Image: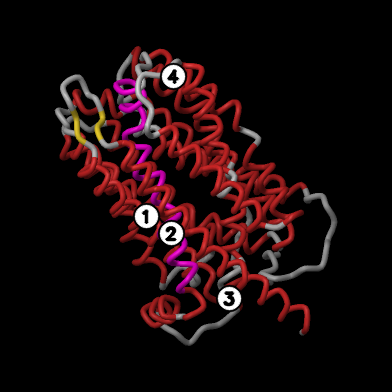
Amino acid sequence: MSAPIDVLETQKKGSTFSRYEVFVIVLLAFLQFSVVLDFMVLAPLGYKLMPALNMSKDDFGNAVSGYAFGAFAAGILISGFADKFDRKKLLLVFYAGFIIGTFLCARANSYEFLLFARIVTGLFGGVIASITNAIVTDIFQLHVRGRVMGMIQIAFAASNVLGIPFGLYLTQTIGWHIPFLMIVVVSIVVAVVVFVYLKPVDAHLKLKSDKNPLQHLKATITNPNYVVPFLATTLLATGGYMLMPYGSDFAVHNLGLSEENLRYLYLITGVATIGVMPLAGILSDKIGKYKVFFVGSVASMVILLIYCSLEQTPFWVVALLNILLMSSIMSRIAPSQAMMSAIPEPKDRGAFMSINSSVMYLSGGISAFVAGKIVGGKQGGYVENYDILGYVVTGAIVVTLILMCFVNKQVQKKIDQHKKV
């Protein structure tokens, strides 16, 4: 029996989840863990990858952008078809491609090969988040969706706690290829579980559409109700793609951290922030999604301006600021995704999520490319103009706050209309 698809169902069905719903949350969290780790692990490996493959900072920014541009292209290409297939089958196809792309990253022996591998990984991995969000929206009602998004996005913190420190350890002791192979092994296990145990997610197929894929894509892109959400998503991705690719380089060469302390930094930050997303999800369901998003955004701006202007700094200060920064940034994810999930009509959900993911990655790719042009490098790896990146990201957060305010009003309007029916 397929899951209900009424986005704005507000009738309370209890505060607990069924055993299968818990299974879905845990499974999607593990799946997100592998995909997020694939993106996250590249940034802290930057200080090793650049000399190993004879890459400049500009080249490294291009490698990060390659994933994003691949994800953008894939999201646009499948958006017209996203609502015409069982989401489980779609997930398995793209997850398999993601595993192949990650394996290619592990085999890279030059900048050009790594760039190609990142594009392949992005073509498949970049779509997975949109499919996951569509599955969550199909199965879980809006009044618990913030909590569900928060629990699934705990994968973001888990990648800091388990994946990145372990990946750095393997890099420092064996080689930078090994973390990618680790991700491949984990992903294969997750794919088998999805294939065997996840039920079909196909209730949306009952909503017949007379539009062909191209018409469906055009109708979704040009829908005036979707324009502001797409614009908001465009800016939501700016921070991560601008700051993270050079985060490890900045920490080692500007702040004075040793390679060992860098590993501990990610571990401490991950452990300290692992409960932030579930808490943010619970609070967004209880006190309001935009309120939680607003507080997280303001805190992010304050800490960003401080952190990005630092020079040589004691480890404990860097660790404290990283914990505060990551906590504020992660607190924005669950409420923003929950608000976005309520925007599309059921018949457009897969297409909307795919396009939304695409514009996020396009923005991320452009941001990483621009960041590579802004930062410079002195002898010894010193990262110049990191403070300028902080100012740019802060400006993007301000505009995003305004746009998400309009998104929140759209959601509230839909809820009010639904109650009247």
Query: Label 2, label 4: how many angstroms apart (C-alpha)?
Result: 30 Å
**Residue that carries the numbered disc 3 in the rendered image:** 345
* Residue 374 point in image, percent of width and height: 23, 43
Residue most extreme to the bottom: 210
Work out whether mark 2 precedes mark 4 in sequence or the reverse, and give the earlier one: 4
For residue 184, say whether it is visible.
no
Check disc 2: other Cα within 10 Å, few if <14, some if 14-19, many if 20+. many
Query: Label 1, label 2: how many angstroms apart (C-alpha)?
Result: 6 Å
In the displayed structure, 260 sits above or below 294; it is: above
**Residue that carries the numbered disc 2 in the rendered image:** 357
For residue 20, say whether it is visible.
yes
Give me the residue at 52% from left, 74% from top: 348
Q: Are marks 1 and 2 in contact (CB under 8 Å)?
A: yes
Give me the residue at 30% from left, 54% from top: 70
Residue 69, quarter of the rendered image: bottom left
Work out whether mark 2 precedes mark 3 in sequence or the reverse, and give the earlier one: 3
Residue 379, quarter of the rendered image: top left
Check disc 4: other Cα within 10 Å, few if <14, some if 14-19, many if 20+. many
